[in-house]
Image (spheres, helix red, strand yellow):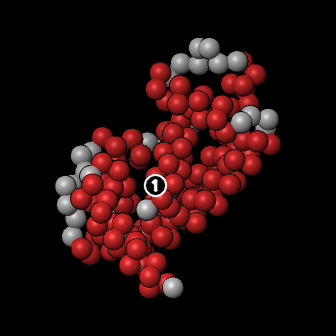
Amino acid sequence: MNKLRKVTGMCLMVAGMLLYSGLLLAQEVLQQQPQSDYSDEQIEQFAGAVIKVLPVQQEAQEKMIEVIEDNDLTVDLFNQIANQLQTTGQSEGIDEKDMEKFDKIAGEIKPIQIEMNEKVNEVILEEGLSPQLYHEMVSAYSSNPKIQQKVDQKLAEEREEDE
C-alpha cells in the first residue's frame, strides 16, 4: 500500500514536469471522471501494471534527480518552480538564475520523461490496459476507498505469490 502511494507521489511529480514540457496526456486524464468501479480483470491488470511500472518510474526518477542536482538545483526548488509555472503560468518571484537552471534542466529531463513514458505505456499495454484507463485507475485509486481496497488486496495477493 505504501509502495503504491509512493508511486502515486512520484507520478504527481513526473506529471508536473510532463505538463511543463508540453505533454498533456496527464491533464486530459485528470479532467475525466474516473469510473466508480472496475472489473476484477481490470483490477488484476492494473495491479500487475503497477508492479511493473514502479521500477521504470523509479529508474527515471533517479535519473531526473541526478540531472536536477547536477545543475545545482534542489528537487524541492525544481518542484516548486514547476508547480508555480503549472498553476499560474508565471515566473514572477522566481530568481532569474534559478529559472535559467530550471529551463536547462527541463530540457535535459524531457528525453528521460519521453523514454519513461514509452516504457510505461509498453508495460501497461502488455498487461492488457490502455494508458488512458491505467491513468484513470491511478486517479480512482487516489480518490475512491473501494477501488483502493480492491487494488491493495490484489497487490497483497501478488506479493504473496512472489514469496
- Residue kind at label 1, given as amino acid type: Arg
Residue 78 lies, with reference to residue 138, above or below; the image says above
Q: Which residue is mark 1?
A: 5
Q: Classify residue 116 as left or right of residue 51.
A: right
* Residue positioned 34% across, 43% down in the render: 30
115 and 65: which is toward the camera: 65
Q: Looking at the picture, how far across and down is residue 66, in whole percent?
A: 74, 49
Q: Is 82 left, or right, of 40 in this rendering?
A: right
Give the residue drawn at x 34%, y 47%: 29
Any part of residue 108 in sight:
yes
- The quarter holding residue 82 reads top right
Residue 143 or 34: which is nearer the viewer?
A: 143
Q: Position of residue 42 (x, y in %)?
A: 28, 70
Mark 1: give few (<14), some (14-19) or many (20+) Cα within 10 Å: few
The relative height of residue 99 versus residue 149 in the rendered view (above or below) is above
- The residue at the point 79 percent across, 38 percent down is 71
Relative side of 91 to 24, left or right? right
> Left or right: where does residue 117 sit relative to residue 64?
left
- One can see residue 46 in this view: no
Q: What is the total number of numbered labels drawn onto the structure image?
A: 1
- The percent coordinates of residue 39 (x first, y second) are 21, 70
Residue 162 at what x, y percent from top left? Answer: 49, 84
Tell me the SS state at disc 1: helix
Q: Which is nearer the eye, 126 or 151? A: 151
